[in-house]
Image (cartoon, grey):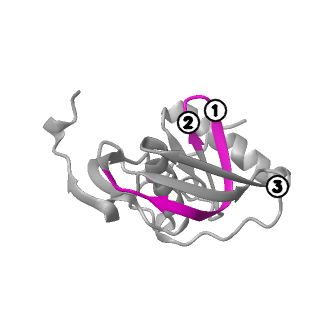
Amino acid sequence: MAIRNIITEDDQTLYKVSRPVTEFNDRLWQLIDDMKDTLKKADGVGLAAPQVGVLRRVFIINTGDKVVEVINPKFVERKGKQEDVEGCLSCPGEYGITRRPNYVKIKAQDRYGKEFTFDGEALIARCICHENDHLDGIIFKKHVIRMLEPDELNG
Ligand code: NI
């Protein structure tokens, strides 16, 4: 258990494409456990491995009920449209309105390599898209229609 440092948008690591996970071993579990501690401390909704400097296709999402561990995700379905406020732990204090699918379904592997599907709408769908983008070296600003001004952030 350890808190890892979350890199910010000036770090070029965030713009690189992550490699698939091929070994489901102690090292991966340590990474995921550390990411969970890091996400909890940062009070965020999602965190991707590149944000802690590891270029592997891993992210976690806190759905409110549980933290879902997602490895080697692939989209199975994307439906609808939503526009809402989005931010990123790697871009502290910055928020913008993004356009995303309102529903997504992914296929992924768990920490033991077992395949599962995970889906969600609204915030969860947005979060899945946001975290998956990190694995392809994309930060949310690419999808921003309009950045929020500081005086729009209250409430
Ligand atoms: Ni992010």
Residue at (30, 42) in percent of width and height: 93
For residue 72: magenta? Answer: yes
123 vs 153, left or right, is right
Q: Amino acid at mark 1?
A: Lys
Displayed quadrant of residue 79:
bottom left
The C terminus lies in quadrant: top left
Q: For the point 80% across and 53% down, which residue is it?
A: 27
The image position of residue 36, as x and y in percent, is 64, 38
CA distance for labels 3 and 1: 18 Å
Res 66 label: 1
**Mark 2 and mark 3 in contact (Cβ < 8 Å)?**
no
**Magenta extent:** 61-82
Position of residue 40 relative to residue 139, above or below, is: above
Mark-to-mark CA distance, 3 and 2: 20 Å
Q: Nearer the viewer, residue 142 or 33?
A: 142
Q: Main secondary structure of the magenta part?
A: strand
For disc 3, the marked residue is: 114
Give, as a three-letter code, the residue at label 2: Thr
- Which secondary structure, mark 2? loop
Q: Are marks 1 and 2 in contact (CB under 8 Å)?
A: yes
Q: Specify the amino acid type for callout 3.
A: Lys
